[in-house]
Image (spheres, helix red, strand yellow):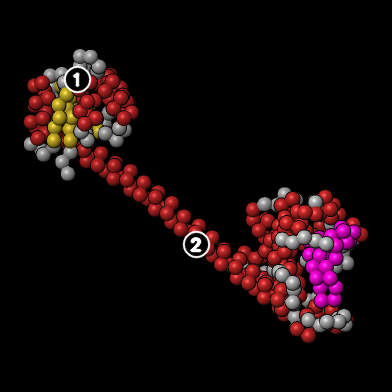
Amino acid sequence: MMEHILIVDDEEMIRNLLSSALLQEDYICHQASNVDEAFVLLGEQPIDLVISDIMMPGRSGVELLRDLKKVDPDIAVLMITGLSDMNTAMECVHLGADDYITKPFGINRVVLTVKNLIERRCLAIEKKNYQVSLEFKVMEQTAQIRKTMNELSSAYDNTLTALVKALDAREKEVGSHSERVMNFASFLGGKLGMAGKELQELAKGALLHDIGKIGISDNILLKPGQLDDGEWIEMRKHPQVGYAILSEIEFLKIPAEIILTHHERYDGTGYPKQLKGEQIPIGARIFAVVDTLDAMTSDRPYRRALPFAAVANEIIKFRGAQFDPAIADLFLSIPRKHWEECAGKQFI
């Protein structure tokens, strides 16, 4: 590729001398006798390097340099100055000139300087293009990683949802109890100011709360009548079984804590650890309220769904015993229609 050089000087003899020498080096040369002509040519030709005299009639080489760098900061500029203009030459360097030569100059020195500046410009442009390319590749790879992580997260969520639906079906739940409880918990958690990862972990804990029942035999889990003492001992192991299943999975460690404590009671009479008050994770305290909502407003083999008013009475009755008082009060302050929207159905 042949580089284009623009020579700007009011002396035709100097323009011709420089053009002749640079043409011998296979550069394409353009000439302008003043700054205005230079900018006309710059608008018409792709110029790689400008050689400009500093002192010219009309607008000076300094003005050319200043305006040129605003238009094209990558263009190489070589200034020509007299020995008496050294201060101006240094000013040009500060304004962005790549180098300067003094009159009288040796033509070989000019040619060598031009070669060096062209080479430096090419390297700078290559570096800039590489940087842009690298940034673009990083953006592409980052987008791909995010897409993959989102797909992986979606695959995890779909797998967990399918597993929970299978568990709900095993217990002959009407609809999806676990998904409704997840929706209730997420809604109530949002009202408490939870967001982002904390809210996602609450949702997973609520969705997977009964995962431990996978280890409970059908004879106990599906028994139509009351469980005896021995059977209750087995049934009450399901939070610990669920915790054991999920706590080794890194992204489910926090949900596993909710699963372990979802049958604890605010007054300390729950199981498996008899935790009390704020010893119980906030997610499990939220769960206790919304699990009661879904259990009471859903049909059971032994009874029909109860009215929403019965749920409110239950929350009031056991406020401070089974339920965190602050969470119970927040639940009671939320209009019934919002809970119905979460459930996807109307209550009695």
Quadrant housing the N terminus: top left
* Image coordinates for residue 80, horizontal then vertical, percent: 19, 24
For this view, does 184 lie left or right of residue 323? left
Are there few (<14), some (14-19), or many (20+) residues within 10 Å of tag 2? few
Quadrant housing the C terminus: bottom right
The circle on residue 157 is none
**Residue, x 23% and y 21% (percent of image)?**
36
Which of the 4 image quarters holds residue 282? bottom right
Badge 1 marks a residue whose secondary structure is loop
For this view, does 230 lie left or right of residue 250? right
Residue 32 visible in this rendered orientation of the protein:
yes
Q: Residue furthest bottom?
A: 219
For badge 1, the amino acid type reads Asn
Q: CA distance from mark 2 to mark 1?
A: 59 Å
The circle on residue 148 is 2
- Is 305 contained in the magenta span? yes
* Image coordinates for residue 167, horizontal then vertical, percent: 70, 75
Magenta residues (range): 288-314
